[in-house]
Amino acid sequence: MANIYNSRPRVLSGIQPSGNLTIGNYLGALKQWVEVQRDYDCFYCVVDLHAITAGQDPVELRQKTRESAAMYIAAGIDPEVSTIFVQSHIPAHSELAWMLTCMAPLGWLQRMTQFKDKVGKQNQESIGAGLLNYPSLMAADILLYHADLVPVGDDQNQHLEFTRDLARRFNHLYGETFTLPSVMNPQAGARIMGLDNPTAKMSKSETSDNHAVFLLDDVSRARKKIMRAVTDSYRDIRFSDEPERAGVNNLLTIYQAIKDESREEIEGDFADKGYGDLKKAVAEAVVSTLEPLQARYNELMNEAGYLDSVLKLGREKASAVAEPTLKLAQDRMGFLAPS
Ligand code: ATP
Ligand code: LTN
């Protein structure tokens, strides 16, 4: 599957350092990142330039950027195997994003569901234009590395389609330049829903108390949140697309994503059980994921200098790939090379 630019098939993905990571981020993205890292040449980015599209506190952004990188490692990304880097450390992301923004039809950008959802919550007059151009920056992230695969939750599938369309457009106008990436969603856990409202995607920026389990939640708090999750008045435990069963379906999905078991096996295990048993089992599965991750995270945050050295190396490795791609795209678009 290797493309013409890379000797090994390549993976790229990123998470915004816009809050505390949730089990949705873990099951939809991070867990897959870990699983593919030995089979592909992987680049994992902390997308801080994306995080400012929603507004940020400078002190907090810097802190969350380090914390996110530490969380990638704590979740199992091995910096000796994969490249971990900060998006804003590689100026090529901003440069290519501008070039792509100028080619991205406004109609495509305005049709993005994430844009419509985020704008819907705010006053149109005051929102930043970065929210509209967000997908062009994401396309730049992916295309700079000639990524073959992009492991994400399914809320990002439309952005991946946009990236492919834009790459196709560029290649058509200026000659074969970019590799068309494919989306990679996990089999289970591509969309974890809020525990308090199973019709809305679990999100790190949603602030209601019982919405999300955060990866750094104290385990007793995580347990409580799951025990309080919204369910329904049925009794049987089975996977279902019916809206009124969304809460139980979500708990089963979390369980399935962690345990890597089939739906049939899981339904069999819970055949004679009640919702209380299901919640306890999900809580134990979640806690068994959080405990080792938190222990490693705390070690990393106390290991002075280690994280900085990982990000420095990541920056070098990412730059070595991104710079030549940027140069090629600039040349194709007609920019005069500096002498
Ligand atoms: P925000 O609330 O700040 O917009 P978010 O929680 O939606 O953030 P992102 O940074 O947008 O998180 O997403 C990072 C990765 O996590 C993406 O691959 C995204 O698809 C995935 N992801 C986010 N939330 C979920 C979820 N509830 N279920 C599955 N995957 C998710
Ligand atoms: N838009 C993504 C984050 C993101 C990303 C990327 C994901 C930015 N650049 C490149 C994959 C590849 C989101 O999850 N909100």
Image (spheres, helix red, strand yellow):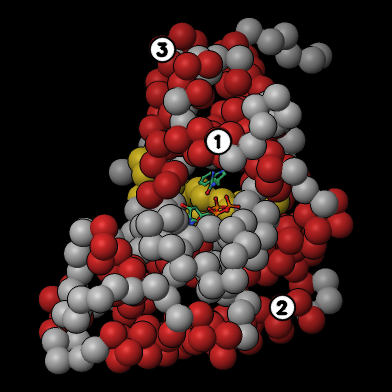
The reply to whether the residue tagged 2 has its Cβ within 8 angstroms of ligand 1 is no
Res 272 seen here: yes
Q: Earlier in the sequence, mark 1 or mark 3?
A: 1
Q: Position of residue 292 (x, y in %)?
A: 55, 86
The circle drawn on residue 150 is none
Q: Position of residue 149 (x, y in %)?
A: 40, 46
Give the camera-side residue of 311 and 119: 119
Q: Is residue 61 left or right of residue 259?
A: right
Label 2 with label 1: CB-CB less than 8 Å: no
Residue beneath disc 1: 120
Q: Mark 3 and mark 2 in contact (Cβ < 8 Å)?
A: no
- For the N terminus, give its image quadrant: top left
Q: How many marks?
A: 3
Residue 39's place in the image compared with 338, above or below, is below
Q: Please determine whether, in this image, residue 103 is positioned above or below residue 145.
A: above
Label 1 crowd bin: few (<14), some (14–19), many (20+), radius 10 Å = few
Instruction: Give percent across and percent down for residue 214.
Output: 58, 72
Please tell me whether mark 3 sits on a helix, a strand or a loop.
Answer: helix
Q: CA distance from mark 2 to mark 3?
A: 46 Å
For discs 1 and 3, the disc positioned in front in the rendered view:
1
Residue at image position (19%, 64%) is 240
Residue at image x 46%, y 68%? 196
Amino acid type, label 3:
His
Mark 2 burial class by Cα count in 10 Å: few <14, some 14-19, many 20+ = some
Q: CA distance from mark 1 to mark 3?
A: 34 Å
In what quadrant of the picture does the C terminus appear? top right
Disc 1 element: helix
In the shown orientation, is residue 196 left or right of residue 205?
Answer: left
The residue that label 2 is drawn on is 300
Amino acid of disc 2: Leu
Which mark, residue 172?
3
Q: Tell us which disc is closer to us: 2 or 1.
A: 1
